[in-house]
Amino acid sequence: MRTQFTFTDPVSLYHAEGFEPQPQEGPGLAGQLSPEPDHGEETYRGTGRLEGRRALVTGADSGIGRAAAIAFAREGADVVLSYLPGEQADANEVERLVQEAGRKAVLAPGDVSDEQVARGLVRRTVEELGGIDLIAVVAGKQQHVEDVTQLSSEQFDETMRTNLYALHWIVQEAVPHLPPGSTIIGTSSVQGYQPSPNLVDYATTKAGITTMCKALAQQLAPKGIRVNVVAPGPVWTPLQVSGGQPDDAMPSFGTSTPLGRAGQPAEMAPAYVFLASPESSYVVGEVINVNGGMPVP
């Protein structure tokens, strides 16, 4: 069986064309995507790199967050799974996979754009897992708007609260609980470097996440807490079909990367594991770009 360690051609590893338009109502479900995304369910093999760790993952029901949660569990971590209530079906599947890995899974539905929900995730992790030492903030809001004059203040605010404020609230609540050796991983995007004209608010938050994490990294490093960032390129997740991209963009989604295809969530997970693991002990304030070869600064 192929794993993330199997020698293979990255060009032909996954679906190498665009995707059929398949709009979903937000937030969207991975179980309804075609082709089905690879979150590492059958391919990710753990090696004990996170044994005994206590993790909080936002956006853990599907996409990159789901892949990170599966990988963390298979590396030995217990995981609190944060997701929107409408994503319960996907979250139940992730819970099953974490438990099959022999680790504890805690379901924590709620909207991280609400400050009390975001802060409550940290308290829930401490209560349920006996502490917290690994945070992966993956949940994000992305809705395309072709004309800036039609970008409502309501959407702009919700994007900021989901993508930026939640990161601040979670980190601020967590720092008093984080022992030396803990890790925080933010999720930026190639959009933070090469913004699309129809993703003004989303791209702005992704650039902000990178800057915020670099600042936090300097502040928290003396405490032994490392902060880093993963910046994905185009990845096949429910985010894309539930308003993240226009329907007419789906047939070419991801095909402009040097690899000629969109990424899969499973391809993002190893970057999160590396940054979470003590093997990256001297990596602080760094951005790992997992984008199929798209040039960024």
Image (tube, rainbow, N blue to C red):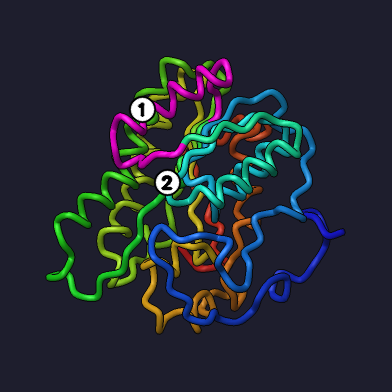
Q: Is residue 196 above or below residue 97?
A: below
- What residue is shown at x 72% (from left), y 76% (from top)? 12
- What residue is shown at x 34% (from left), y 66% (from top)? 195
- Kindly tell me whether residue 98 is visible in this rendering: yes
Q: Nearer the viewer, residue 54 or 190?
A: 54
Question: Residue 25 location, x and y as percent?
Answer: 39, 65
Question: Residue 112 location, x and y as percent?
Answer: 36, 40
Q: Quadrant of residue 147?
A: bottom left
- Kindly tell me whether residue 297 is visible in this rendering: no
The answer to whether 158 appears left or right of 235 in the picture is left
Identify the element where label 2 is drawn. Answer: loop
Which residue position holds label 2? 84
Q: CA distance from mark 2 to mark 1?
A: 15 Å
Task: Specify the segment rendered in magenta.
Answer: 109-134
Is 80 included in the stretch rendered in magenta? no
Which residue position holds label 1? 119
User: Is the C terminus in the top left, top right, bottom left or bottom right quadrant?
Assistant: bottom left
Q: Is residue 222 above or below residue 277?
A: above
Q: Nearer the viewer, residue 35 or 234?
A: 35
Tell me which amino acid carries mark 2: Leu
